[in-house]
Image: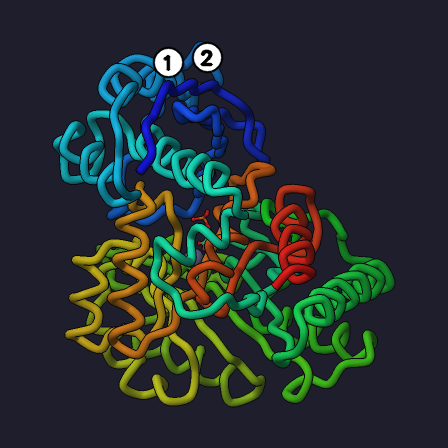
Amino acid sequence: MATISRLHARQILDSRGTPTIEVDLYLTDGSMGRTAIPSGASTGTHEALELRDGDKSHFLGKGVLTAVANVNDKLNSALAGKEFASQEGLDAFMLELDGTANKSALGANAILGVSMAFAHAVAKSKGVQLFEHIKDVYGATEYKLPRPMFNIMNGGKHADWSTDIQEFMVVIENRDYPEMLRAGAEIFLHLGKLLEKKGLSTNIGNEGGYAPGFANNEEAFAVISEAIALAGYELGKDVFFALDVASSEFYNAETHTYDLKTEKRSLTPTEWMNLIESWMAKYPFTSIEDPFAEDDWASWVEFTARNGDKVQIVGDDLLVTNIERVQKAIEMKACNALLVKVNQIGSLTETFKAMHMAESAGWHNVVSHRSGETEDVSISHIAVGTAAGQIKTGAPSRGERTAKYNELLRIAEVI
Ligand code: PGA
Ligand code: ZN
């Protein structure tokens, strides 16, 4: 039982310098929860609506003052003095108040801000850490430190299209979390030195990974492989590749082709599938996210039939953390893992429902940040408290990314 006393939202900046919403929620016992909402760049078209002001004279139209006002006025008057027995009770109340399918009345950013701030406040009120409270809410049977996917090379929309593939990630063979973090960081540091030696750029993209740019996507695997060896790790034994292709961003729906801009060629879905499979034949992959566009269901189904027993196939833009799309993907056997992004759906309860649905189908869950992030570390707690087992939160670089990795180090000390 928790009674909300008041809400206060403000507009702050995210890691791209774009406004986002931060919400403070006070309970009547004095406990306060605070959270800030992230934002995507390569967003799925089926995501819940992130409410932005659209006033071009204010932050180029990206302000969130309407969402802030919705919290401070509408949600505050509806919620102040109300008692909620559960997270689900609060989230259901807000969904009804909003009344739209995609949260466009109040804004998914406003609703999620209140949903998450409530979880933070209730954890404080119980005198526990957020991950402990989340374990209760989710109904997990254990805590689990997640295995990270380190996005050490950025491309696509996150890095001025230096490659078509958005995220080249490394996954460390399962070991203690601090050791996995160390390995990820050592590979990242060696990659930086290697790029410098090759005369390539060491500037970084939105998620902290390097973005030197190559004539074709495959060259990136060769360079990262070299960095892994220089760091003293063995590819295929200590370290594996994972990809987020984010292919909706270069899929051409009119021609039904995947248009590789860096390689200056357009591939049919079959040719594109063959190319991905040729990479899989050469390099060890544990996970491939969004290999096909968000509505190219037929290619997803075929790819999963051909490779689902060999590799984790993760739906991000395909699923948008939405139970209707997760259900459809389970029925169609379109993938075998869910990328979990709280702001794609806009409440903790709906996020957890999607995760439970994925788990019941025998899928894995990967808890994820967005390319536009803040210092907020809630996702580290969500990963541990739901025992998801995997997290992707960028390179071990840039404060908004290391904040999550460092929070996991702190959690690792107490569980
Ligand atoms: P986004 O990218 O936050 O820009 O959507 C992350 C991802 O695609 O996984
Ligand atoms: Zn993605």
Here the colouring is rainbow
Q: Is residue 413 above or below residue 83?
A: below
Expressed as whole percent of the image width and height from the top left, the position of residue 341 reads: 39, 51
Amino acid under label 1?
A: Asp
Q: Does label 1 point to a residue whose CB lies under 8 Å from ligand 1?
A: no
Tell whether 108 sits left or right of 382: left
Amino acid under label 2?
A: His
Q: Are marks 1 and 2 in contact (CB under 8 Å)?
A: yes
Tell whether 40 sits left or right of 104: right
Between 392 and 304, the one lying in front of the other is 392
Expressed as whole percent of the image width and height from the top left, the position of residue 285 reads: 53, 80
- For image coordinates 56% across by 85% down, the residue present is 284
* Residues packed near mark 1 inside 10 Å, few (<14), some (14 to 19) or many (20 plus): few
- For image coordinates 54% across by 40% down, the residue present is 373
Residue highlighted by disc 1 = 55
Specify whether residue 216 is in view: no
Expressed as whole percent of the image width and height from the top left, the position of residue 357 reads: 24, 66
- For image coordinates 48% across by 34% down, the residue present is 35
- For image coordinates 53% across by 60% down, the residue present is 392
SS assignment at label 1: loop
Residue highlighted by disc 2 = 58
Q: CA distance from mark 1 to mark 2?
A: 6 Å
**Quadrant for the N terminus in the image:** top left
Specify whether residue 77 is in view: yes
